[in-house]
Each structure stands twice: as structure tokens, then as C-alpha cells.
Image (spheres, grey):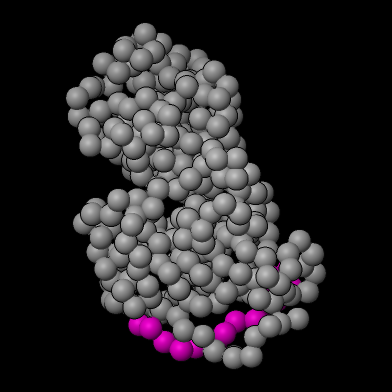
Amino acid sequence: MSTLSSPVMKALILENYGSPYILKEISRPFPGKGEVLVQIIASGVNPLDLKIKSGQAAHAQTKLPAILGVDMAGIIVETGKEVTDFKIGDEVYGLTGGVAGIQGSLAQYTAVDSRLIAIKPANLSMREAAAIPLSFITAWEGLMDRARVKKDKTVLIQGGTGGVGHMAIQLAMAKGATVFATGSAGKKSIIEAYGAIAIDFNRMSVAEYVKEYTSEEGFDVIFDTIGGDTLEASFKALKIYEGHLVSILGWGTHSLAPLSFRGATYSGVFTLLPLITGKNRSHHGEILKEAARLAEAGKLKPLLDTISYTMETITGAYHAMEQKTNQGKVVISI
């Protein structure tokens, strides 16, 4: 069943890595079995999108020409066979494509696997909803699926004001943990507004903040969103035996000796796996249902950049993120 008449749509096409997007009119997709057709209202931009566009994200298995954009929010306008959880008119959001040859959200419509989406939080706008999926799913997989964060645990978020970081703070707070987050002095107020204790990484060394905030015991859980030297330094900040470190950027070569000597554990997160492999996709939909519940309870709200971009002005959106002039998640209005 469909409410549409036009067989075409506008989309941003990437034909070559590092080249500008080309705005084209192309054939509109049709939902297959288990899929829904979504009219996209907003497309969230993540650092991953910039890496894919520049050709620096081989792990995303992009196939050019491509329509990028991994996050979206929109309205279901058509349902495929065997879809029972959604209907035409539902407002939904999700991490639905932009990798591994799957159409992304920089287009007016997309046909998506219904297992990947959830009903949008009722109290958030489409732009706010589109800012959530990749960041929140990543935070959930790290803090809940891997580290099992719960009440009374001490949690350190490395990079507390980034897209994933500010979601991780709110999730850990909602679970009753005592939350700390690193950031620059200028980001202190953002971290504290979410209820976490801010640690200025420019002012304090790892040894200093472990001593001040944990009496040299170390943190129960550390969630690393930065990688590199920050990841390696985090090995030294874990609680002996009980400490668990989760990283979303656990690439490169690292010495595991500090981790091993503390008897602590490590987990990695690769959020794109369900999209790339087709396995465990329903878990992403389930996670987004949890995000909606938290948002509607007033415990989760994305930090959005105040500038509104469109498909015609997407170059400015990417430039702002490259120059780090954005103040929150960047969202493209479709």
C-alpha cells in the first residue's frame, strides 16, 4: 500500500571519494519484504560520514556511486510484505544505511529494513531524533551490552561532549552510575549540565584524576571515544580486577601490559556490523526503543548545532565539522 505518486526523488550522490556531492533526481526505491519506505525529514551527520566521503573508512565497505548518511528520521509512506510492527504515517528513526552498498539518508526517500528502526520519541523533533541513532546505539553497545553498567558503578567517559560521549553520559546517568567525563575547560558546563563530574584533561594527568576521584582505586568502567594515546592511558585508570574498558576506536598498536597487570578487561564496539553483515539487526531497533523511552522520560536529549543545513548547503555542514566550529550534532534537513 502506498500514498505516493511520483516514481522519482532527489538525492545527493557521491561519485568519487573527496569530490563534492552531486544533487540528482533518481528513481525512488520500493520497499521489499520486511522493509518500509520512509520519507526522510532529517539526516544526522557523524564524523564517520566525513571519513567515508573522503575515502578514509575502508571498514564501512562503501561502494561508489553511493548515497551516504547513516542516521535518519522520517515518516513511513509505504510498507512492504510481512511488515507488522509499523504502518503508514508512523514517525520513525534509525541507523539505516550509507555503508556497504546500502542507500543512506541523504535523499528524499529510503527503503529500510524495518528491524533497524523504532518509533521516534514523541517529545523530540525530527532533527533531534536524527541526531541520536549511531551515537546512542554505540553508547548502548559499549556501556550496556559490554560493560553492564548499573547503579553505584563509577564510569569515566573519555570525550564527554562528542556525539557518542554526550549520549554515553546520559545513558550511564540514567542507569544510576556515578559518571565522570573528560573535556576541555570550555566544555565543563556542557558535561555538568548532563549531571556528570567534569575532568579537564589539560589540567590533570591520568594519575592525578584517578587519585582525586577514586582514591587511587580506579574506575569500574571507562568508555573511550577518542582512541590513540587516550585509549592507552585509560588502561592505567581501571580498577584492579573489576575494571572494564570499552573503546569505539580501538585501532592501531597498543601495549596491553598496563591492562593485564591490573587484571582488567577490554571490549571493542563496531556499531556497523548489523548493517554490513545483516546479522542481529533487530537489536538496533530494540536499542532505539530504549532511547525513545529515555527521551520521553526526560533523561535523554541530543545536543544540536543551532545552524540548519539542507541538501543544497551540505558542504557548509561538512566544513563546520572539519573545522570543529559546530556546537553539537549537525543535522541536514531533507
Residue at horizontal 61%, vertical 62%? Answer: 92
**Of residues 294 and 110, the one drawn nearer to the viewer in this rendering:** 294
**Of residues 243 and 203, the one drawn nearer to the viewer in this rendering:** 203
**Residue 183 inside the magenta-drawn segment:** no
**Residue 24 inside the magenta-drawn segment:** yes
Q: Is residue 246 left or right of residue 30?
A: left
Q: Quadrant of residue 15?
A: bottom left
Measured as percent of width and height from the top left, residue 223 is found at: 43, 33
Whether residue 74 is visible: yes
Q: Quadrant of residue 13?
A: bottom left
Q: Which residues are magenta?
A: 22-36
As displayed, is residue 251 above or below residue 255? below
* The residue positioned farthest toward the top in the image shown: 215
As displayed, is residue 32 above or below residue 114? below
Quadrant in which the N terminus appears: bottom right
Measured as percent of width and height from the top left, residue 8 is found at: 54, 89
**Of residues 241 and 300, the one drawn nearer to the viewer in this rendering:** 300
Whether residue 279 is visible: no
